[in-house]
Image (cartoon, helix red, strand yellow):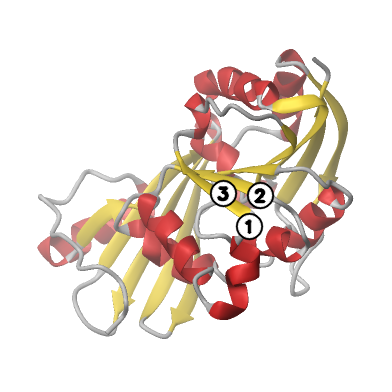
């Protein structure tokens, strides 16, 4: 048993572009297709990313000394939440995915983690329409999640974040750093206890987007293709939009590499000026 939910069959194969589309058309009706960040993809995304330590050291260093509540946007299953709690922070975690929040609650239900759970408040909500009564000393949006916010919605989202910060409050967010090597599709195999997964990343430079897909071949059951399209705003674009939304930019840094691999993340550090 994989511990993952039963996957509903796809009502026909969608017309996907690029390599993911060619895979879908080749496998045909034997394939289940779902949204990467939706209810079906959430547990699989958690399984693949739970051990990812990318940007963790940078985030902990930037938030060191923050004693009041930290607002973590798109907290998911807790890849950054758990290190923040272990470092002593009080965290309010926000996510729209009920399945990912359930994963996080499950990780904190163990007796050894209950002391961490006491410092965490979870909110199931859309971070772009957030309206919480309290104000925070710092806000965090990690894991390049800014790519899931459409360009037209980013200015309003940044204003919403600022409105939830105390004057001078810190906002830390990470973004994918486009490079010249992003032109063609890349395929990275990841083996987990229950499946072989192929992570497919294909850039669309003209549209400042990336198509991300995971082809999952489980030990039991048919293949699954999880897909999503994410935007790739440059750090310069994000810096300009943050300043327009009432932030002052402290710095833009490259995340420290993990496991000897070059980092593809830029971390922007801004402060509310209003």
Mark pair 2, 1: CA separation: 7 Å
Residue depth check, mark 1 versus mark 3: number of the one nearer the observer: 3
In the picture, which quadrant includes the C terminus? top right
**Quadrant of residue 5 within the rendered picture:** bottom left
Q: Which residue is mark 2?
A: 91
Q: Is residue 245 left or right of residue 113?
A: right
- Callout 2 touching callout 1 (CB < 8 Å): yes
- What residue is at 80 percent from the left and 56 percent from the top? 60
Q: Foreground residue, 107 or 195? A: 107
- Which comes sooner in the sequence, label 2 or label 3? 2
Please identify, in this view, whether the residue under mark 2 or under mark 1 is nearer the observer: 2
Q: Which residue is mark 3?
A: 121
Q: Are the residues at dot 1 and dot 3 in contact (C-beta closer than 8 Å)?
A: no
Kind of element beneath mark 3: strand
Residue 176 numbered mark, or none: none
Is the residue under label 3 in contact with that under label 2 (CB below 8 Å)?
Answer: yes
**Where's residue 139, x and y in %?**
70, 38
């Amino acid at each position: 048993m994989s511990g993952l939910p039963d996957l509903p069959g796809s009502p026909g194969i969608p017309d996907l572009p690029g390599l993911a589309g060619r895979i879908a058309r080749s496998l045909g009706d034997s394939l289940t297709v779902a949204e990467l960040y939706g209810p079906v993809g959430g547990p699989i995304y958690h399984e693949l990313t739970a051990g990812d330590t990318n940007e963790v050291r940078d985030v902990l260093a930037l938030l060191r000394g923050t004693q009041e509540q930290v607002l973590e946007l798109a907290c998911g299953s807790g890849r950054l939440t758990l290190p923040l709690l272990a470092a002593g922070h009080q965290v309010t975690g926000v996510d729209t995915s009920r399945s990912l929040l359930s994963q996080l609650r499950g990780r904190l239900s163990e007796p050894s983690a209950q002391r961490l759970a006491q410092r965490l408040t979870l909110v199931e909500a859309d971070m772009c329409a957030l309206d919480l009564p309290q104000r925070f000393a710092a806000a965090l949006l990690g894991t390049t999640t800014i790519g899931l916010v459409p360009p037209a919605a980013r200015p309003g989202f940044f204003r919403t974040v600022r409105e939830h910060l105390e004057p001078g409050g810190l906002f830390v967010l990470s973004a994918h750093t486009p490079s010249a090597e992003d032109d063609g599709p890349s395929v990275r195999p990841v083996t987990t206890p229950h499946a072989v997964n192929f992570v497919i990343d294909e850039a669309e430079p003209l549209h400042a987007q990336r198509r991300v897909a995971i082809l999952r071949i489980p030990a039991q059951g048919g293949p699954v293709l999880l897909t999503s399209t994410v935007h790739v705003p440059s750090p310069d674009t994000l810096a300009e939009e943050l300043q327009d939304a009432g932030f002052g930019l402290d710095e833009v840094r490259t995340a420290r590499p993990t496991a000897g691999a070059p980092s593809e993340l830029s971390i922007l550090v801004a402060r509310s000026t209003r």
